[in-house]
């Protein structure tokens, strides 16, 4: 049990170092200006991409309840492919929309430039919700799977999360900042090490009692 508790504490220390690296990369990307999309962008890098939206292939990602002037409303992230001449299409998360506005969101026509950050692909786990490819409802941000379901010959291996202010029409609501994942690994490590210390104290007290008997 002692080895298990210490091992869990050590694991959280390693996770702490990893999370600090992620947060540092996000902070650096937040402060940096957007750059033209490179061939191999880094996760969370702020980039700009030019192309043409395909609103006929729009999809919805996740189920999320947000506060609106009408009160709490269920909706999701509007995913729209951005086609680029001579390059793979990029799936763009344009922002949150109410479920009842899914077919009533205006999409810029012609060539547009989108500024956002790179979100690496996710992969479904054993407990992930099942995608509804026919209904274009997805619950895992997996670009190859989404692109194939939309009938695209190929897509970039990441999703571009659009940054900006909401349009005059109100939707979609893009991200305003890069994500800020929580970093609780230090307190987790302290908890596991603390439990290990308590175990030693209890064992020492038990051993002393046994030796006195």
Image: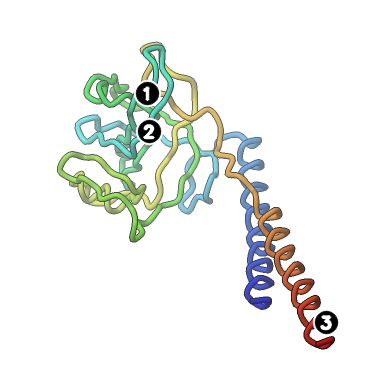
Provide residue 192's location: percent of width, then percent of height.
68, 63
Quadrant in the rendering for residue 26: top right
Circle 3 SS class:
helix
Please report whichever mark, 1 or 3, sits nearer to the chain's N-terminal start: 1
Q: Is residue 164 above or below residue 189?
A: above
CA–CA distance between discs 1 and 2?
Answer: 13 Å
For residue 208, the mark is 3
Provide residue 27's location: percent of width, then percent of height.
65, 41
Q: Quadrant of the N terminus?
A: bottom right
Residue drawn at 31 percent across, 49 percent down? 155
Q: Is residue 6 above or below residue 17?
A: below
Mark 1 or mark 2: which is in front?
2
Crowding near pointer 2: few (<14 within 10 Å), some, many (20+)? some
Circle 1 SS class:
loop
Please report whichever mark, 1 or 2, sits nearer to the chain's N-terminal start: 2
Front residue (pair 123, 48): 123
Outermost residue on the front side: it is 213
Residue drawn at 19 percent across, 46 percent down? 133
Query: In the rendered image, which residue does mark 1 sit on?
Result: 172
For residue 104, the mark is none
Q: Is residue 211 left or right of residue 100?
A: right
CA–CA distance between discs 1 and 3?
Answer: 67 Å
Front residue (pair 88, 11): 11
Residue drawn at 38 percent across, 33 percent down? 64
Crowding near pointer 1: few (<14 within 10 Å), some, many (20+)? many
Query: In the rendered image, which residue does mark 2 sit on?
Result: 64
Circle 2 SS class:
strand
Crowding near pointer 3: few (<14 within 10 Å), some, many (20+)? few
């Amino acid at each position: 049990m002692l080895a298990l508790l210490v091992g869990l504490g050590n694991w959280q220390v390693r996770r702490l170092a990893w999370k600090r690296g992620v947060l540092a990369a996000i902070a650096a990307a937040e402060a940096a200006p957007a750059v033209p999309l490179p061939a191999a962008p880094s996760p969370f890098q702020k980039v700009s991409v030019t192309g043409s939206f395909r609103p006929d292939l729009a999809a919805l990602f996740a189920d999320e309840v947000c506060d609106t002037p009408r009160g709490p409303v269920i909706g999701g992230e509007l995913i729209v492919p951005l086609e680029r001449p001579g390059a793979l299409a990029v799936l763009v998360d344009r922002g949150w929309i109410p479920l009842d506005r899914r077919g009533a969101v205006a999409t810029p026509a012609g060539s547009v430039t989108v500024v956002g950050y790179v979100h690496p692909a996710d992969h479904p786990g054993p407990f992930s919700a099942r995608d509804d490819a026919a209904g274009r409802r997805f619950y895992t941000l997996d670009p190859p799977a989404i692109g194939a379901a939309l009938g695209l010959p190929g897509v970039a291996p990441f999703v571009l999360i659009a940054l900006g202010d909401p349009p005059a029409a109100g939707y979609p609501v893009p991200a305003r900042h890069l994500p800020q994942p929580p970093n609780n690994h230090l307190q987790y490590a302290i908890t596991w090490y603390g439990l290990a210390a308590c175990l030693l104290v209890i064992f020492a007290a038990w051993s002393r009692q046994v030796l006195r008997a």
